[in-house]
Image (cartoon, rainbow, N blue to C red):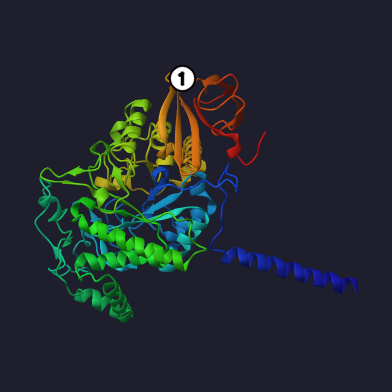
Amino acid sequence: MKLSILFIAFLLLVFSCKHTEKNDRVSDIAPIAQPHQSKDLQTPFFWEGANIYFLLTDRFYNGDPSNDINYERTASTGVLRDFMGGDLNGITKKIKEGYFSELGVNAIWLSPIVEQIHGNVDEGTGNTYGYHGYWTKDWTALDPNFGSKKDLEILVKTAHKNGIRILLDVVLNHTGPVTEKDPVWPSDWVRTSPPCTYTNYQSTTSCTLVENLPDILTATEKSVKLPDQLLAKWKKEGRLSQELDALSLFFDRTGYPRTPSNYIIKWLTDFVSEFGIDGFRVDTAKHVDEKIWSKLYEQASFSFNTWKKKHPNDMLDDTPFYMVGEVYGYGISGGREYDFGDRKVDYFKHGFNSLINFELKSDAHKDYETIFTKYDELLHHQLAGKGVLNYLSSHDDGHPFDKERNKGHQAANILFLSPGTAQIYYGDESNRSLTIPDTQGDATLRSFMNWEEIENNKITQDILLHWQKLGRFRSRHPAIGAGSHQRITQTPYVFTRTFKKGTYIDKVVIGLDVPKGKKSLLMKDYFEDGTKLYDAYSESYIEVKNGRVQFDSDFEIVLLELAAQQPTQP
C-alpha cells in the first residue's frame, strides 16, 4: 500500500515538472521588473526624455539559425556586406533576458524589416545584399531573414510587457536597387535619374540618392496601377485578392488617389494597426515632398488608435503615435527649419514630433555645461513642444564622436545627460568596434554585436555597467531629458534638472567630475534639510543636512534622487 502511494506521488511530481516545463517553453512573454524601481512607483513615459536603442536587426542576435539563408543569397560579398543571422527572435530573447531593461532602454528602434531585394549589387566595395533593410522589394511582407509576422507580433507583445516601445524604421523615398532578380518598378512609380546634387530643394527631392536606387515619385497626384511584378508575386504567394481588397478599403476610407506614396503609406501603417507599433523613424525625410509626411503621420495615428481600441489590455498608455525624422544634416541650432538654400522647411509642421540631431557628435567635444545649457535653451524656446533625437554614433555616420572607442564613460555622460531624447546605437554601451579591418564605407560601423566581449572582457563589462547605471537613472527621471537645466556649483560641477507636466513633478541632482572619496555637495534651494536621497551610482542613502549632502564614494559621478523613489528604505 505504501509503495502504491509513493508511486502515485512520484507520477504526480513528474507530471507537475513536465507541465511546468511546457508552460515555460510556450510562454512568449515574461515581464521583467525594472532594477531599483518599485512596482507601485511607475514613471510616466515622455518621448522627450526616452532612451531609444537603435539596432540593425541582422547584426544584433541570432535567435533562429534556420532563417539565415533565403532566396539563394549565397554569393560571396565584401566584408560585412552579407546577411549575418540576426533576427526578430534574437531581439525578443534579449528583451526577455532583461538586457534592455538593465540598460534603461524604454524604446527599441528596429532597422527596416520589410522584404528586401533578392539579388545583390556591386557598389565597388564587393557584392552587397540588403542586410540593412533599406532596399525594399515588397512593403507588404517581412523579409524571412529577419523573421515572420508572428515573430514580430511576439516581439512587440514582449516589449510592451516589459515597458518598452517599438519604433519601425520606414523607407518611402526609394525602392531597392535593380538586379537580375529585382526588376525596376514602372516609370509612373519611380525615376531613375537625375542624381541628387543637393544644391537646392529641387535637386534634393526630385532625384535619385545614388546610382541604381530608383526614387519614388512622391510628389505626383496621379493615380497609378500596381506593378505587374508585385501582382504576380502576391498571386504566387496566394494573397492577391486579400491585398487588393485591403487596398480598396483603405482608398475608400481615405478618399486618397492611388498614388505611389499613398500605396506605401497604406502598407507602412498596416504594421501599426496589426501589431501596435508605437512609432516610426522616417528614413531620408528631406528627399520626399514634406506634405507626404503629414499624411503618413495622420494615417499612422489613425491605425495606432484603431489598434488601441481593439487591444485595450495590451496598450501601454495614452501616449500618441511618435514620428522622428532623418533630415540628414539637421542640427538643433537650426531650430524648427531646415535650409535647402533656396527654401526652408519646418518638418515639425509635417507630422514629426522630433528630428535626429546631427550636432551632438561635434558638441560632445565641449565641456558639459556648454552642451547642457545650449540644449536646454533651444529645446525650451525655439523648439518648445518638439524634440530632437541625440546620437554619438550610428549606422551611416562615418565621423562619430568616439570612433576609436576610447571615451566610453564620457560618451555615456554626454549622451544620457544631454537634454533631449537619447539614441544608443547598438554596441555604444559595450565598446563594439567601429574600425573593422578590410571593410569599406559604412560596413565598418555595422559589425555583429560583441556578445563575447560582454561575457568575458572585464573592460567591456565595466563600461557596460556605467552605461547601465546612467541609463536606468535616466529612464526613471524624465527630468533629465525633458526637464529644465540649472547649474548649482561650477566646482565641483553639480546641476539639477526639474520637470513638471500636469500634476507630475520630477527633480534630480547630478554631479560630474566630483572628487573621489569624501564629498560635500550643496543642496540648498533644491532639496530641503531632512530630505533622504539615494545616490543611484554608488547605491548609497544620504540625508540633506545644513543645505548639503556629505558622503564617501569611490566614484567621480553622483546621481541623486529622492529615496522615496526606491523600492526599499534604509
Where is 414 relative to 356, above or below? above
Instruction: Identify the amino acid type marked 1.
Output: Pro
Residue nearest the viewer, comparing 207 with 481: 481
Kindly tell me whether residue 148 is visible in this rendering: no
Q: Is residue 78 above or below residue 334?
A: below
**Secondary-structure class at tag 1:** loop
Residue 105 in the image: above or below residue 6: above
Q: How many marks?
A: 1
Q: Is 203 situated left or right of 359 in this image?
A: left
Q: To which residue does mark 1 refer?
A: 492
Dot 1, crowdedness within 10 Å: few (<14), some or many (≥20)? some
Q: Is residue 77 visible?
A: yes
Residue 35 lies, in percent from the top left, at 57, 44
446 relative position to 179: left or right: right
- The residue positioned 33% from the left and 79% from the top of the image is 242
Please identify the residue farthest to the right as the structure is shown.
1
| 405 lies left or right of 217 | right
